[in-house]
Amino acid sequence: MMTLLNRLMTCDRGGAIAEFMLGLVPLVIALALIFEFGRAFWSHQAVIKGVRDATRYLTRVEDPSDPAAQAVAQRLLLTGQQGLGGVERWSSGSAAPMEVSITAVPNAGGTFRGPATIQIVNVAANVELQLPMSGVFTLFGAAPLGVVTYSVGDSGRHYGK
């Protein structure tokens, strides 16, 4: 029995695999974090671009409060195209509910070039982003990230056609 115990104490076979398994845990966590945050930043940038496109469109139409114009702006927000169809800019979470408001700024003193009342078009999108790799963090005792919710907004002066 003593020879078996001595042999196990002096044998270093399998040491490399044990060290690899100790290093694998932080490596998997790091890769999951890189994937999740990269995807979240990419989706956030896509939403920002969509909100800017929708705002730019609504500042150039005749009536930004027209439901047809707002439907086109919604398609621009989601797909980048004015027509039906297209591929959505971000693939997970909910479709971004777009909120449009129009603010009137008085220009009676002629501070700005243009009419006596200048319209400002405000577009906001509330987005829920699902994080598919959040289950990896539960394997190591962390709480899952789940859903990230954020809002993106933009505004521009209404010029009309």
Image (spheres, rainbow, N blue to C red):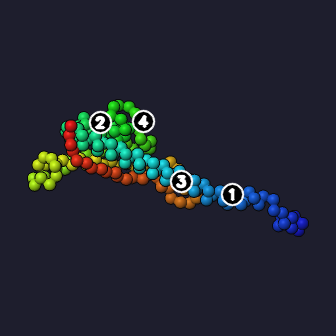
Q: Which mark is residue 89?
A: none
- Write down the residue under mark 4: 87
Q: Which of the marked residues, 2 or 4, is nearer the chain's N terminus?
A: 2
Between tags 1 and 4, which lies in front?
4
> Circle 3 sits in a helix, a strand or a loop, which is it?
helix
Q: Residue at x 60, y 54 (%)?
A: 28
Distance in Å between CA atoms under marks 2 and 4 = 15 Å
- Write down the residue under mark 3: 34
Q: Neighbour class for label 2 at 10 Å: few (<14), some, many (≥20)?
A: some
Q: Quadrant of the N terminus?
A: bottom right
- Image quadrant assignment for residue 27: bottom right
> Circle 4 sits in a helix, a strand or a loop, which is it?
loop
- Image quadrant assignment for residue 56: top left
Task: Indicate the position of residue 120 as horizontal and vertical percent values.
Answer: 21, 49
Q: What number of labels is visible?
A: 4
- Write down the residue under mark 1: 21
Task: Indicate the position of residue 43 as horizontal and vertical percent values.
Answer: 43, 47
Q: Neighbour class for label 4 at 10 Å: few (<14), some, many (≥20)?
A: few
Left or right: 88 as drawn, with respect to 3: left
Distance in Å between CA atoms under marks 2 and 1 = 53 Å
> Label 1 amino acid?
Met
